[in-house]
Every structure is written in C-alpha cells, then in structure tokens.
C-alpha cells in the first residue's frame, strides 16, 4: 500500500494507469571515476522509482543509491 501523494492507495493500480516509472542508471557503471585532491570519487548508479502526478510532474517515490570505488 502506498499512502500520501498517490491518487489511489495501490502501487499496482498506479502502475496499470502508467503513472509509475523505474529509472535505472546502470549505464553509469562504466564511467571512469575522477580523483580530486588525491581522493577517488564515488559514482552513484541509483535505481529511482518515480510517480507521474495529475499535473504530469514526476515525483520520486524511492531511490536506491548503489556505489562502488573505482580502481
């Protein structure tokens, strides 16, 4: 069950209406990391669940940040 800003209380219903989107930034895994002041930077590759509201604006529901250290 999803409460709050969704029109219905069911994530399944919103998916069936086409209002739920999953963004997968896995393609960022191959981007080389940068080094700043001698420290290797972490590169996030999140999965992001978005909801399209009645005004056609996307709102994040959940974000999973995955990171790794470049070699």
Image (tube, helix red, strand yellow):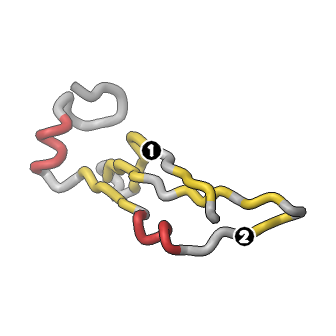
Question: Seen from this angle, which residue lies furthest right?
Answer: 37
Query: Which residue: 39% across, 54% down?
Result: 58
Comes first in the chain, label 1 or label 2: 2
Query: Which residue: 56% across, 54% down?
Result: 68
Residue 28's label in the rendered image is none
Q: Which quadrant would the N terminus be assigned to in this image?
A: top left
Q: Quadrant of residue 61?
A: top left
Query: Which residue: 46% across, 53% down?
Result: 46
**SS of the residue at dot 1?**
strand
Q: Is residue 32 left or right of residue 11?
A: right
Task: Find the distance from the CA under tag 1 to the CA under tag 2.
Answer: 23 Å
Q: Is residue 3 left or right of residue 39?
A: left
Q: Is residue 48 left or right of residue 40?
A: left
Closest to the camera, between mark 1 and mark 2, is 2
- The reply to whether callout 1 and callout 2 are in contact (CB within 8 Å) is no
**SS of the residue at dot 2?**
loop
Query: Which residue: 49% across, 69% down?
Result: 28
> Mark 2: few, some, or many residues within 10 Å (few <14, many ≥20)?
few
Of residues 3 and 30, the one nearer the viewer is 30
Question: Seen from this angle, which residue lies furthest front?
Answer: 71
Residue 70 location in percent, x, y? 62, 63
Q: Which quadrant would the C terminus be assigned to in this image?
A: bottom right
> Mark 1: few, some, or many residues within 10 Å (few <14, many ≥20)?
few
- Residue 13's place in the image compared with 52, above or below, is above
Of residues 48 and 15, the one nearer the viewer is 48
Residue 34's label in the rendered image is 2
Of residues 21 and 52, the one nearer the viewer is 21
Residue 23 location in percent, x, y? 36, 59
User: Which residue in the protein does label 1 denote?
Assistant: 63
Of residues 70 and 43, the one nearer the viewer is 70
Q: Quadrant of residue 39?
A: bottom right
């Amino acid at each position: 069950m999803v409460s709050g800003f969704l029109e219905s209380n069911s994530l399944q219903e919103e998916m069936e209406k086409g209002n739920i989107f999953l963004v997968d930034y896995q393609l960022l895994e191959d981007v080389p990391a940068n080094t700043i002041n001698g420290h290797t930077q972490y590169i996030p590759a999140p999965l992001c669940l978005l909801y399209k509201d009645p005004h056609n604006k996307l709102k994040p529901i959940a974000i999973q940040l995955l990171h790794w250290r470049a070699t």
